[in-house]
Image (cartoon, rainbow, N blue to C red):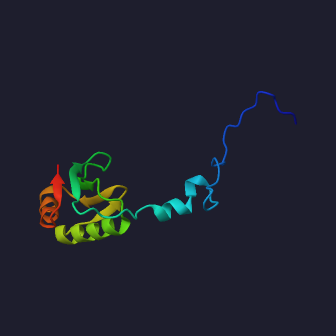
Amino acid sequence: MTFKSNARIVYSTDTGGKCPGCGWPQRDCKCSSRRAGSEPIPNRVIAKLRMEKKGRGGKAVTLIYDLPDNAAFRKELCQELKRTCGTGGAVVEGGVEIQGDLRDRVREVLEKKGWLVKG
């Protein structure tokens, strides 16, 4: 079997290198995931609200975004909002999603905490 000189790779599982810190492939780096989510919480939190329906089969969700990058902070906020609104929700990258168009309830809860709410 001979290969042509102009042959090219069509598919490769190569990830493009290893992380110098942990030795894992760059896409599965373990040291960056440990650093992520540990940003300190500022004294004055500014939360932004919006309602989205796109890509959700017509179902509305309330998205609270531009929150501090602290995983424990976001998880605690999500639990509190789900309990207060009586609905489901999830922590997503950069914020929290609450099922349904509940912007008024969420705004009320966040303002009681002393946060500045935009949107």
Residue reaching furthest to the top: 6
Q: Nearer the viewer, residue 5 or 22?
A: 22
As displayed, is residue 104 above or below residue 112? above
Q: Residue furthest front?
A: 43
Q: Residue visible at 21% across and 50% down?
A: 51
Q: Residue at x 16, y 55 (%)?
A: 117
The quadrant holding residue 18 is: bottom right
Quarter residue 98 falls in = bottom left
Q: Residue 83, located in which quarter of the rendered image?
A: bottom left
Q: How many marks?
A: 0
Q: Is residue 64 left or right of residue 103?
A: right
**Residue sitting at 37 percent across and 56 percent down?**
93
Residue 28: % across, % down: 56, 58
Q: Visible in this render: residue 95? A: yes
Residue 41: x %, y % from top left: 30, 64
Residue nearer the viewer, 102 or 57: 102
Q: At x 61% / y 55%, what residue is drawn?
A: 19
x, y percent for residue 65:
28, 54
- Which corner quadrant holds the N terminus? top right
- Can residue 102 be seen at all in this image of the molecule? no
Please tell me whether residue 15 is drawn above or below residue 73 in the rendered image.
above
- In terms of depth relative to the viewer, which is nearer, 115 or 63? 115
